[in-house]
Amino acid sequence: MNAPLLITSHAEPFFFNVDPGTRFCLYHPPSQSVPARGAILYVHPFAEEMNKTRRMAAQQARAFAAMGFAVLQMDLFGCGDSCGDFHSGRWEQWKRDLAVAADWVSDRTSGPLHLWGARLGALLALDFATTRKVDDVILWQPFVSGRTCINQFLRLRLATGMDRDDPAAPRSTAALRAELAAAGRLEVAGYELDAAMVRGIDACDAVNLKLLPCTVHWFASGAPAARRLSAGAARLAERWAPLGVKLYFHPVDGVPFWATSDIAECPALLAATTAVFAPAVLS
């Protein structure tokens, strides 16, 4: 199962214009030795998780390209090497970025469009799939609630205050949210949150999304326990079934690479994702 992951492909870096400014992209052209399979658009995680997942995303993108998919990785507005300050990022702007990127990569290959998101990027991909027809949505350890993502991020600030034994430091995410609402900005782990950004992220919950008909593959590794995640996936599957959405849950073993102090890998996740989209499976 690991053999395809060792195949290298030439990733083409470039910038293209998206109002406002430019976005940095990596394009993985499909292998010419296999039939074209369609396009995959990658949606990266939030804040530092984006950097922690880059290696895993690159390995999986190469595996997809080796199977005949055209793969586009784009840094959203305010993120990575794209233009804009991090605090200027907005949920609706990120969806507009995805619309432009989806058109670009779809124009370069025949076949269907697939979305692939990690963590908060997975929730953003699901939201995008409510207005854009896609065949599959690939979720890597997704947040199903934007508010949960922000609360988890705010806990990094709480941990910093506790480490410094600062009696004046906020002791709850509610207190930090109140501080953010009053000041409009809040620094967390080197990233500046903006109140408007947080409102947009908070507002998205997978339970309320009305996806267009598609297949969703949810891959989960690390904590929390797979049983709990499986139960959540089952509830979403039941809710989405009347919409023509099929959801499959794939538990895998591995470290939480998106949150480790050093860059880590999860070979089991790469192998499981590749196996689901192998030509013999999809043909």
Image (spheres, grey):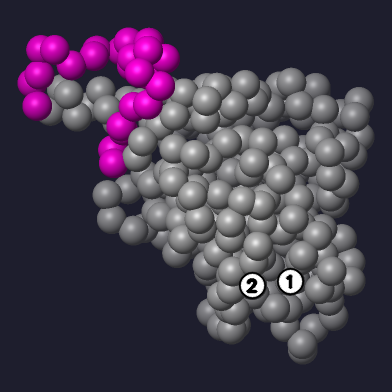
Q: Is residue 213 among the parts visible in the rendering?
A: yes
Residue 168 rendering spot, x and y as whole percentages: 13, 12
Label 1 CA crowd tier, 10 Å (few <14, some 14–19, many 20+): many
Q: Is residue 1 among the parts visible in the rendering?
A: no
Q: Nearer the viewer, residue 69 or 224?
A: 69
Q: Nearer the viewer, residue 113 or 19?
A: 19
Magenta run includes residue 165: yes
Decide: marks 1, 2 in contact (CB < 8 A)? yes
Say which quadrant the N terminus sits in: bottom right
Say which quadrant the C terminus sits in: bottom right
* Three-letter amino acid code at the position of disc 2: Tyr
- Tell me the magenta residue range: 164-190
Q: Residue at x 59, y 26 (%)?
A: 200
Vertical side of 245 occupied by 264: above or below: below
**Circle 2 sits on which residue?**
27
Which type of secondary structure does the marked residue at label 1 adopt? strand
**Circle 1 sits on which residue?**
70
